[in-house]
């Protein structure tokens, strides 16, 4: 596995702990995961609800896509009113601590700074988990608390970290998303028309400081199309197709200091029957790397490959949970996280 795939098995949930091992059709490599029997419980489909929205000046790339409504914003106001520091998983917060699949969590290493920013850190053992997410698991229907975003969006976080201290063992600074359908074990995670337990879900990684010293002027930005039966002979974990490494490497100006605040964004435009959808990465408002296009996913039969035009298109049927996290070697400072959409009508909120 290359370094972008091997991080799937890190103990501190660096790429959604459901994926403790990865099987990629790009490298045909698999590894075993643990406690699978407790991680995937089927839940009924939840209803869609709307969230409170505001209108502010959207970034140019968001506005060009028709995303002028700010449907989510934690901007220099990471406080006890917006972050569930008490681990209550109660209503009314913007941020929770990632507890999906029964993982223990802790807010002990999370610092709410006086300027409204938040500093995330991680235990050297990788447990309990300290990642923050826009949703969390609860024991009763609809089996999640918080917000997940559907129907297209522009996601942007302003963050900083010390690139020289990053040690990939045990995790690294990261800002990513994953489908609520998978995280909460909703019935809509299933690939329609396939055998029971055959799943299909997406994971767009907006930013990862995981490229190592060989890429001092770049960061990782990947997208995974996950599929299959957990524990099958094809892949002991789920299989996935992802972007080529040359695309994953997101170059930044050589004068960039990652220790200073920068904007890391992802523009998601859904596909239609007549128009391709796309995923485009941005650094400080400038596109980095090529746009990834895909055709409308209408439950075509497996498997997705680098050649199937609908690969990654399942995102248009799912709802993205925002996730912030880091490894033990390097705290990550987050000043703001914002989401712009055409409206909140396709979001899920509880």
Image (cartoon, rainbow, N blue to C red):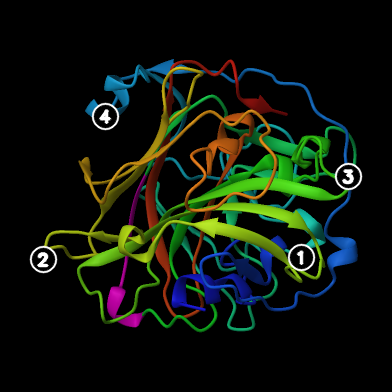
Extent of the magenta region: 157-165
Contact between labelled residues 4 and 1, with CB atoms less than 8 Å apart:
no
Residue 307 coordinates in the image, percent (x, y): 48, 49
Q: Which one is closest to the eye, mark 1 or mark 2?
A: 2
Give me the C-alpha separation between circle 3 and circle 4: 37 Å
Contact between labelled residues 2 and 3, with CB atoms less than 8 Å apart:
no
Q: Residues within 10 Å of mark 4 (few under 14, many from 20)?
A: some
Q: Which residue is mark 4?
A: 61
Precedes in sequence: disc 4 or disc 2: 4
Q: Residues within 10 Å of mark 2 (few under 14, many from 20)?
A: few
Residue 266: quadrant of the picture: top left
Give me the C-alpha separation between circle 3 and circle 2: 47 Å
Q: Residue at x 79, y 41 (%)?
A: 190
Give me the C-alpha separation between circle 4 and circle 2: 23 Å
Q: Residue at x 68, y 41 (%)?
A: 180
Q: Which residue is mark 3?
A: 42
Q: Which one is closest to the eye, mark 3 or mark 2?
A: 3
Give me the C-alpha separation between circle 1 and circle 4: 38 Å
Q: Is residue 57 visible?
A: no
Precedes in sequence: disc 3 or disc 1: 3
| Left or right of residue 63: residue 32 | right
Residue 91 coordinates in the image, percent (x, y): 72, 33
Precedes in sequence: disc 1 or disc 2: 1
Residue 50 coordinates in the image, percent (x, y): 63, 17
Q: Which one is closest to the eye, mark 3 or mark 1?
A: 3
- The answer to whether residue 302 is magenta is no
Residue 289 coordinates in the image, percent (x, y): 26, 51
Q: Which residue is mark 2?
A: 254
Contact between labelled residues 2 and 1, with CB atoms less than 8 Å apart:
no
Q: Which residue is mark 1?
A: 104
Q: Residue at x 62, y 75 (%)?
A: 9
Between 270 and 210, which is closer to the camera in this rendering? Answer: 270
């Amino acid at each position: 596995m290359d370094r972008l795939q091997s991080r799937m098995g890190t103990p501190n949930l660096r790429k959604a702990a459901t994926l403790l091992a990865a099987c990629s059709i790009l490298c045909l490599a698999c590894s075993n995961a643990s406690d699978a029997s407790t991680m995937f419980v089927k839940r009924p489909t939840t209803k869609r609800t709307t969230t409170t929205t505001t209108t502010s000046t959207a970034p140019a790339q968001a506005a060009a896509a028709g995303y002028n409504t700010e449907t989510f914003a934690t901007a220099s106001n990471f406080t006890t009113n917006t972050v569930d520091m008490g681990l209550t998983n109660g209503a009314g917060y913007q941020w929770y601590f990632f507890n999906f699949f029964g993982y223990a969590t802790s807010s002990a290493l999370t610092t709410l700074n006086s300027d409204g920013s938040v500093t995330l850190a991680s235990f050297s053992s990788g447990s309990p988990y300290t990642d923050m997410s826009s949703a969390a698991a609860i024991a009763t229907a609809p089996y999640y608390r918080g917000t997940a975003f559907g129907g297209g969006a522009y996601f942007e976080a302003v963050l900083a970290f010390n690139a020289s201290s990053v040690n990939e063992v045990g995790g690294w600074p990261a800002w990513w998303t994953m489908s609520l359908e998978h995280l909460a074990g909703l019935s809509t995670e299933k690939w329609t028309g396939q055998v029971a337990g055959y799943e299909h879900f997406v994971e767009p990684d907006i930013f990862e400081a995981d490229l190592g010293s060989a890429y001092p002027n770049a960061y990782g930005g990947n997208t995974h199309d996950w599929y299959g039966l957990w524990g099958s002979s094809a892949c002991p974990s789920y299989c996935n197709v992802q972007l080529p490494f040359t695309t994953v490497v997101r170059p930044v100006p050589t004068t960039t200091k990652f220790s200073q605040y920068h904007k890391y964004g992802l523009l998601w435009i859904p596909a239609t029957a007549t128009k391709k959808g796309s995923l485009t990465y941005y650094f400080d408002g400038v596109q980095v790397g090529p746009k990834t296009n895909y055709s409308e996913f209408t439950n075509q039969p497996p498997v997705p490959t680098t050649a199937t035009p609908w690969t990654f298109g399942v995102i248009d049927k799912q709802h993205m949970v925002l996730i912030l996290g880091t490894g033990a070697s390097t705290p990550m400072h987050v000043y703001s996280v914002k989401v712009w959409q055409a409206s909140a009508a396709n979001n899920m909120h509880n």
